[in-house]
Amino acid sequence: MSTRSVSTRPRGAGRPRRPSAAARRRVVRRRLLLLAAVALAAVAIPALIAPFADRAVQEVTLPLRHDDIIRQQAADKHLDPSLIAAVIYTESRFRDQTSHAGAKGLMQILPSTADYIARKSGGTAFEQGDLATPQINIAYGSWYLRYLLDHYHGSVVLTLAAYNAGEGKVDQWWQAAVARGEPFRVASHIPFPETRTYVGRVLDARARYRREYREELGL
């Protein structure tokens, strides 16, 4: 009688079964589809979010608020809405604040200037605290821009210089240029570096608002 032991382990146990050719093809197809989906997402997702990212960056670097009020005041005062937006941006970055000189609100209007505007425009119920209200602040600042434009015969440069340095000083600079028979120029006729810089910043911002917010400003 043979004493050879009989193994109970199934034949082939312990040897990994190789996947069939069809199974291998299915795995390859799934991997290729996954790679294609990843590649498509890498292209499509940035394209989808780019407009929103661009708008978010734009609103940080060149914000625009109260565009409905700006459009209304521009139409009422016959002003370029991008000029109003540019003045607000340069003065306050569209934030309600009070300067060290006491200028208030979005368009940084001095209390004495606000009182003058109120008298001229019929604002009999005006109080200084009203300058914190965007509607009133933009209305008063727009009225003053219109007044200065009329005073300086439509010169935006002289208007902006006066908005920053005051009408009295700019009248002196303007008259001195006229007396010498020279066209008024920022570099040669504005002695205040701050005012020269201010005029340049507003003009630059106006060009950007015209370019980047045409629809919002109704241009």
Image: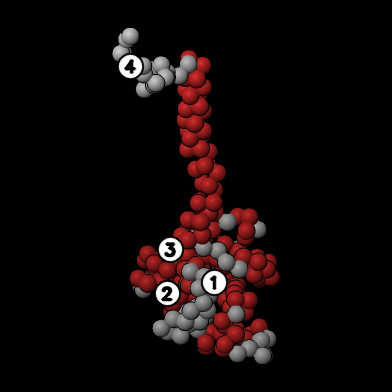
Three-letter code, disc 2: Trp
Q: CA distance from mark 2 to mark 3?
A: 17 Å
Which of disc 4 and disc 3 is earlier in sequence? 4
Find out whether the residues at labels 3 and 4 contact each other: C-beta distance under 8 Å: no
Tell us which disc is closer to us: 4 or 2.
4
Please, which residue is most extreme toward the front here? 1
Q: CA distance from mark 1 to mark 2?
A: 12 Å
Q: Is residue 188 visible?
A: yes
Residue at the disc numbered 4:
5
Residue at the disc numbered 2:
173
Vertical side of 159 occupied by 130: above or below: below
Q: Is residue 182 visible?
A: no
Vertical side of 151 occupied by 39: above or below: above
Residue at the disc numbered 1:
152
Residue 165's tag is: none
Residue at the disc numbered 3:
200
Which of disc 2 and disc 4 is earlier in sequence? 4
Q: CA distance from mark 1 to mark 4?
A: 117 Å
Identified at 55% across, 63% down, the residue is: 64
Three-letter code, disc 4: Ser
Q: Secondary structure at mark 1?
A: loop
The 10 Å Cα crowd at callout 2, few under 14, some 14 to 19, many 20 or more, is some
Q: Secondary structure at mark 3?
A: helix
Left or right: 8 in relation to 4: right
Which of disc 1 and disc 3 is earlier in sequence? 1
x and y, in percent, of residue 75 in the image = 68, 66
Find out whether the residues at labels 2 and 3 contact each other: C-beta distance under 8 Å: no
The 10 Å Cα crowd at callout 4, few under 14, some 14 to 19, many 20 or more, is few
| Depth order, front residue of 142/132 | 132
Vertical side of 48 occupied by 38: above or below: above
Which of disc 2 and disc 1 is earlier in sequence? 1
Vertical side of 176 occupied by 121: above or below: below
